[in-house]
Amino acid sequence: MGAYEDLIAFDRETRALSEVARRLGWDQETMMPEGATPQRAEEHAAMAKVLHARRTDPRVGEWLDASTATDDVSAASLYQIRRDYERAVKLPADLAAALAKVTSLAHRVWAQARDDNDVAAFLPMLTEVLNLRRQEAAAVRQGGKAYDALIDTYEPDTTEAEISALFDALRPRLVALRAAVLDRPAPPELSQEFDEAGQLALSTKLALTFGYDLEKGRIDKAVHPFSSGSGLDARITTRTSLDDPFNCFYSTVHEVGHACYEQNIDQAYLLTPLGGGVSMGVHESQSRIYENQIGRSRAFTGWLYAQMRDQFGDFGIDGPQAFYACVNRVADGYIRTEADEVQYNLHVMLRFDLERALVSGDLAVNDLEAAWNDRFLSDFGYAVDEPSNGVLQDVHWSEGLFGYFPTYSLGNVYAGCLNANMRQDAPGLDAALAEGDTSPATNWLREKVQQHGALMKPVELITQASGQAPTVEPLLDYLEAKFSDIYGL
């Protein structure tokens, strides 16, 4: 074989091993016995060393130098492998192993601290995770900003300055819309309990309705919902709350958006550099458009209302229109994952500002809770009542995912652009959604975005799919039109 073929064969084995490592993480958050945490941390560290050795193998550099692209697929594959290789060779093997071990341990500490509402119990581990991620950023940033190096892990070629500009463009209209909506009478809300078995049954029906292939995936419960895997094994988790079934339903739909992206990538790319989502911003565009523009639309909630009546009987909401307003109710709340579309990005902005201050050293870990509470009060106008509703609510920092949070809002912006073009291309979409048929939307997303995997760069992919360069206006126009209608603005 030639250099390119040797490189791809070697890379395929590396990616297969990486999927095994990801499965360890899935198991840890779903089924692993609690007492296994120390051993699992050692297992994560061992896998990290093996993967780092493969990713920095000198032959990879030699094969890259000797390879020539002959088409778009080979050009994109070489770009992705070179990007991964150049980052990996800057990262010491011991640091890669330490990150894997410590974040594995930190997850369990965070989960217990969250259950106990004990911030102090988590801060020493958070300090250790943050220090390791700072070391990683210092190793790979080449003189640039540390936070830029961390963002680049999740959203290639995106900087802190660009994210700040994005939030500066979003904030004024979001804040104005929030104020106008909260000045109007609130729609009805759910006021009874919904049994867990019924929630999970309807949750599974929703997953299937959005095209999730359960022969190549599964649904489990986790403290913080997530998706894991790729290709022929793309798994999701959800969670339940007796008095809030929407938490379960829309967590499921959100994670199905991630999993369907992975399941719908061209099978020719399986276990290749192109066989995964191209960035977390693009990934979040799929989960957010499934969850919101499709799943919370007037047409689809009309179908969901009938499903809830079938599952739970009369649950106190009088008709599809009242249910649509209930699903999209804008109200005070602490939890990002449960936030309505108007306020969701404000939750992300808070995290973005705090975590970049942590990375830069402008904010000490011991001052994080106070900084969170002060910022939350300033942004939302009421105080955090307990740490599990505040600084301990998200899993991300325990896993070292500094730089990840901005991709949620970037995904919302991408979703806004995609939705505007999808609506033009599928004029009969609402009629289908009203019957519980999401295929006009999911097929469009599969064709325009998902099947391509990492063939194109993120902005190139979204521009091609939406017919315009990404901008905040389609998202803001959509939000203002939707909530002005619901609240009579």
Image (spheres, rainbow, N blue to C red):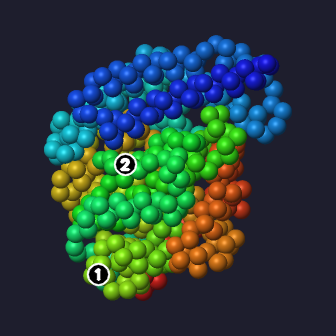
The answer to whether the residue labelled 2 contacts the one labelled 1, judged by CB atoms less than 8 Å apart, is: no
In this rendering, is residue 129 above or below 236? above
Using the rendered view, name the quadrant where residue 419 is placed: bottom right
Which picture quadrant has residue 444?
Answer: bottom right
* 184 vs 47, nearest the viewer: 47
Amino acid at circle 1: Asp
User: Does residue 199 lie above or below 399 as drawn?
Assistant: below
Q: Reading the chain from its start, which is encountered first: label 2 or label 1?
A: 2
Measuring from the top left, give residue 370's x and y in whole percent.
Answer: 22, 47
Quarter of the image holding residue 72?
top right
Residue 39 vs 313, above or below: the answer is above
Q: Residue furthest top?
A: 58
- Tell me which amino acid carries mark 2: Asp
Q: Nearer the viewer, residue 53 or 27?
A: 27
Q: Indicate the position of residue 385 as horizontal and vertical percent values.
A: 17, 57
In the image, 230 versus 131, the foreground residue is 230
| Position of residue 150 measured from the top left corner of the image (x, y, whole percent) | 48, 35
Element type at mark 2: strand
Q: How many marks?
A: 2
Quarter that holds the N terminus? top right
Mark 1 lies on residue = 314
Q: Is residue 41 visible?
A: yes
For label 2, the residue is: 220
Question: Measuring 58% from the left and 29% from the top, which residue is drawn there?
Answer: 15
Q: Furthest residue to the front?
A: 215
Residue furthest toward the right? 70
Q: Residue at x 30, y 47 (%)?
A: 223
Determine if residue 162 is in view. Answer: no
| Residue plotted at (37% across, 48% down) | 220
How far across and down, in percent of the image, does residue 267 sit? 67, 43
**Residue at 38% across / 79% down in the picture?**
323
